[in-house]
Image: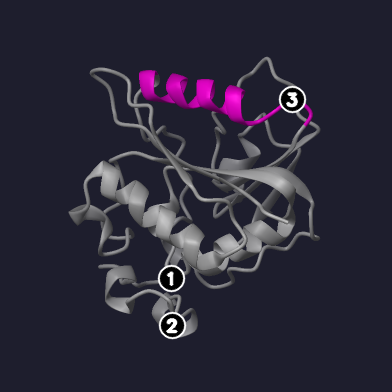
Amino acid sequence: MTNSDSAPCDDELPERLLARADESDDADFYEVPRLVTHVDDATIAALTAEYRSLVPAGARVLDLQSSWVSHLPADVAYASVTGHGMNLAELEQNPRLDARVVQDLNRAPELPFADASFDAALDAFSIQYLVRPVSVLRSVRRVLAPGGTCVIALSHRMFPTKAIAVWPVLDMADRARWVRVYFRLAGGWSEPVLLDRSPVGADPLWLVVARREG
């Protein structure tokens, strides 16, 4: 059974734009651990600097679509960091995580956490793989405390067969605008802020930042 059979795309967006070249089970694709980084060191450092600014010390952090590294500043203490991803072996290699959850958000977009469980939700370089992004952001809003921050980090590298169809045809600024549409459709978020934090001569880095209203 393919993901498209079991997990339809968000009704608010054209299905053809959220289709993927490879609609086979994501669990098979992510079964083998990939202990690599997907952007260069300068871009990782730039993302870490933004996390330092946007995620306060002592926050309860949800790291969505996580892996073996979370890019959080090493010298900042958080109340907890929960990694939510597709491969347990990768999550177990991540020293910043206090808890680990494996879940395919394309099959089940509702997060398995209580309301207002977190103060910040992060997603680094992976939102292009979601076929139900609006549903996921509705769930992220639910598990964030009022005023909690969601930070979506974007760059240009990807697994092309698993990225949604619209992603490769957009430039970086339009990718950020596309993610802004997700927040607007999900409802209950502040107007998303788009930030270009691309280091000179390195992989691009754009951020889409919104806060839970209410």
Quarter of the rendering occupied by the N terminus: bottom left
Residue denoted by label 2:
1
**Foreground disc of the pair 1, 3:** 3
Whole-percent x, y for residue 214 in the image: 73, 56
Whole-percent x, y for residue 188 in the image: 62, 61
Q: Is residue 35 above or below residue 198?
A: below
Badge 1 marks a residue whose secondary structure is loop
Which amino acid type is shown beneath numbered disc 2?
A: Met
- Do the residues bearing badges 3 and 2 touch, measured as CB atoms within 8 Å? no
Q: Does the magenta segment cover residue 213?
A: no
Residue 116 lies left or right of residue 32; in this view the side is right
Residue denoted by label 3:
57
- Do the residues bearing badges 2 and 1 touch, measured as CB atoms within 8 Å? yes
* Magenta highlight: main SS: helix
Q: Is residue 200 above or below residue 100?
A: above
Residue 95 lies left or right of residue 51; in this view the side is right
Q: Quadrant of residue 93?
A: top right
User: Whole-Å distance between the Cαs marked 1 and 3?
Assistant: 37 Å
Taking the spot 65% from the left edge, 40% from the top edge, the residue there is: 92
Whole-percent x, y for residue 104 in the image: 55, 64
Which residues are the magenta region? Answer: 42-58
Categorize mark 2 by other alpha carbons within 10 Å: few (<14), some (14-19), many (20+): few
Badge 2 marks a residue whose secondary structure is loop
Q: Earlier in the sequence, mark 2 or mark 1?
A: 2
Residue denoted by label 1:
25
Residue at the farthest top position: 75
Q: Does the magenta segment cover residue 46?
A: yes
